[in-house]
Image (cartoon, helix red, strand yellow):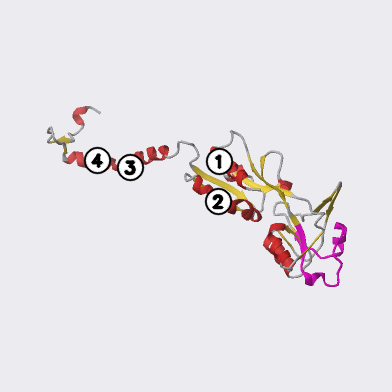
């Protein structure tokens, strides 16, 4: 635009001050929102020199929240004030890439080969438990096959709709048992409650059942047969790991057992 068409914006220039014309005030009012947006953009760039400033989106099974997220979340957020954490609790093994998640956390028996998997919690203990009232007049199982004579609460996969076959190992012997019972669910709280209510044995995380075993509200069986498991963080790696995810992995592995 030719300079002669631009209205004068300044008036009253002296060696001590400069004041705006009426057109200058109107012009400043028009461009003020643009200046504020520009200032915000520069501010956001300045707050993220480490390239970690962002929201970390994680997909986690409900049973793993207390094992992985709860123990470290407070410390992690304090250590990385520029990272927000968005956690979705879900049992299904979702396609994290298409759903917009940075990573997922799952047990080792559901991971597929097209994912990069990093162990977060290893040597995780499980147990087989039932209520004392259920066991009255019944023999406590000494071998996994003895469970075939008992009621059990099944775990049903949200992905395949199949019932989980209980896994056992002792020495070189490995066994998978298809148990039977009146209840099937993918909710761990219901598995625990079903054991309390006398519907037979449930296959649970030892951490969830331990206080009830110690208090005598549940009885464990086949302890030397139940294998250990692990929780893995998994992600797709088409273009390298983002720093926000690397920060979380390093922080979690340093604090989780």
- Label 2, label 3: how far apart the Cα atoms are: 34 Å
Mark 2 in CB contact with mark 4 (< 8 angstroms) = no
Mark 3 in CB contact with mark 1 (< 8 angstroms) = no
Mark 4 in CB contact with mark 3 (< 8 angstroms) = no
- Label 4, label 3: how far apart the Cα atoms are: 12 Å
Q: Mark 2 points at which residue?
A: 73
Q: Name the residue under label 3.
A: 36
Mark 2 in CB contact with mark 3 (< 8 angstroms) = no
Q: Name the residue under label 1.
A: 247
* Residue 28, disc: 4
Looking at the image, residue 210 lies above or below residue 36: below
Looking at the image, residue 146 lies above or below residue 46: below
Q: Give the range drawn in magenta.
A: 127-154
- Label 2, label 4: how far apart the Cα atoms are: 45 Å
Element type at marker 1? helix
Nearer the observer, disc 1 or disc 4? 1
From the viewer's perspective, tell me whether residue 127 is left or right of residue 61.
right
Q: Which of marks 2 and 3 is nearer the N terminus?
A: 3
Q: Which residue is drawn at 55% across and 51% down?
A: 73
Question: Where is residue 225, by image quadrant?
Answer: bottom right
Q: Earlier in the sequence, mark 3 or mark 1?
A: 3
* Residue 146, disc: none
Element type at marker 4? helix
Nearer the observer, disc 4 or disc 3? 3
Q: Can residue 254 be seen in this view?
A: yes
Q: In which quarter of the image is the N terminus?
A: top left
Q: Which of marks 4 and 3 is nearer the N terminus?
A: 4
Question: Where is residue 33, by image quadrant?
Answer: top left
Q: Can residue 187 be seen in this view?
A: no
């Amino acid at each position: 635009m030719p300079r002669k068409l631009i209205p004068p914006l300044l008036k009253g220039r002296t060696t001590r001050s400069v004041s705006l014309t009426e057109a200058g005030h109107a012009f400043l009012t028009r461009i003020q929102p643009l200046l504020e947006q520009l200032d915000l953009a520069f501010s956001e760039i300045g707050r993220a020199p480490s390239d970690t400033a962002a929201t970390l989106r994680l997909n986690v099974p409900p049973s793993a929240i207390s094992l992985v997220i709860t123990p470290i979340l407070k410390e992690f957020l304090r250590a990385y004030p520029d990272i927000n954490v968005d956690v979705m609790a879900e049992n299904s093994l979702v396609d994290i890439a298409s759903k917009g998640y940075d990573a997922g956390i799952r047990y080792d028996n559901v991971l597929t080969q097209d994912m990069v998997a990093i162990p977060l919690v290893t040597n995780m203990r499980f147990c087989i438990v039932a209520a004392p009232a259920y066991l009255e007049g019944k023999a406590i199982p000494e071998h996994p096959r003895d469970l075939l004579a008992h009621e059990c609460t099944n775990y049903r996969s949200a992905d395949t709709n199949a019932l989980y076959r209980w896994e056992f190992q002792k020495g070189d012997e490995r066994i998978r048992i298809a148990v039977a019972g009146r209840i099937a669910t993918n909710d761990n709280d219901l598995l625990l409650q079903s054991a309390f209510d006398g519907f037979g044995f449930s296959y649970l995380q030892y951490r969830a059942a331990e206080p009830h075993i110690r208090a005598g509200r549940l009885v464990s069986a086949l302890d030397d047969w139940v294998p250990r498991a692990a929780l893995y963080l998994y992600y797709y790696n088409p273009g390298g790991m983002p720093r926000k995810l690397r920060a979380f992995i390093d922080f979690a592995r340093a604090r989780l057992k």
